[in-house]
Image: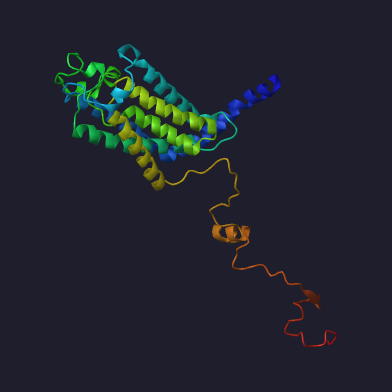
Amino acid sequence: MSLYLTRRIAKLPRRILAETAVELKLLSEKWKLLLAGLIFQYIHGLAARGVHYLHRPGPVLHDLGFLLLPELGKERGYVSEILFASIFVSFVLWTFSPFIFKNKRFYTVLIWRRVLAFLVMSQSLRIITFYSTQLPGPNYHCREGSPLARLPPPDNVLEVLLINFPRGTLFGCGDLIFSSHMIFTLVFVLTYQKYGSKNFIKVLGFVAAVIQSLLIIASRKHYSVDVVVAWYTVNLVVFFIDKKLSEMPDRSIKASTLPVTAAKDGKTKEENHKLLNGNSHDSLDLRPRTQVNGKNMENGNDDESGKDLNTP
């Protein structure tokens, strides 16, 4: 067992280097889309910070989830954050698994390109929604009497652009419909549902998403509507965006491919592909031939088939 582990560890640096070379080549082609997705994460944070200036605290709205779920309390609000952090870190580590494991099913660059596309569209809808109507925040720091419930007008533009990270993101108010935590959770879970290989983890991810929903409501960080809208909106976004994006190649299937350029004998890729699959228009003639006096006779159907073969 120790010898097996030693061999695996010895091969790990070489495997990481080989995968890095492959991923860097993909990154050189897709970097613009990835960079745009990362920049939009800042734009989303900036929008959430901006709506906090518009937030006006008020009585907590009547909510069915608040009636059914016991309140965790201000001192236990960290519970939902621990679960969210676990989901986030686990997903990120899984997306980099091709660098470690021999069996690979996807490319890290391509899967993050897909994930960022899902996030950007979902967050765009979220920004439109929470700017349309500002609800009084149910979280403890957003209620009447809290010094964090209202933000004074900014002294300069830089104060807004810096978004007071990370405190501004942790104690924001007004960005309610729909839950950002549920956007990330559902995008990660749905992505693993399609590209993951362990059925147990797929079920566990779905269960974790449900528990995360309940904890968010029980922590009074969002109204129930924020979570419910996230569930169907993110699922619809992932469904339609996934249809538009080109399908990722499955690295677990090793199929023989022919080069795109023309072969040395002048046949193009399409012609070679037809030959490979036995579908060429110029099908091979497998009829038996008889050679007589240096000529190929085809079942006696040559031009001279009616003549005596011994006639000079």
Q: Is residue 25 visible?
A: no
Q: Quadrant of residue 111?
A: top left
The image's colouring method is rainbow
- Looking at the rendering, which quadrant does residue 170 occupy? top left
148 or 96, nearer to the observer: 148
Image point 40% across, 23% down: which residue?
84
Can residue 69 be seen in this snapshot?
yes
Please state the total of marks drawn on the protein image: 0
Residue at (19, 32) in percent of width and height: 133
Q: Quadrant of residue 117?
A: top left
Q: In the rendering, at what x and y percent does residue 175 appear?
A: 25, 27
Relative to 54, 122 lies left or right: right
Q: Residue at x 44, y 27 (%)?
A: 208
- Asked if residue 241 lies left or right of residue 134, the reply is right
Up/down of 242 relative to 296, above or below: above
Q: Between 213 and 195, which is closer to the camera in this rendering?
A: 213
Reply above or below: 145 against 28: above
- Counting from the top left corner in percent of width and height, residue 168 is at 26, 19
Q: Position of residue 102 (x, y in %)?
A: 60, 32
User: Where, quadrant-wise, is the C terminus in this rendering?
Assistant: bottom right
Quadrant containing the N terminus in the rendered view: top right
Of the pair 14 and 115, the residue shown nearer to us: 115
Against 244, is 178 above or below? above
Q: Position of residue 151 (x, y in %)?
A: 17, 19
User: Would residue 196 be found to the left or right of residue 307 on screen?
Assistant: left
Furthest toward the top, the residue is 75
Q: Residue furthest right?
A: 310
The residue that appears at 53% across and 30% down in the rendered structure is 200
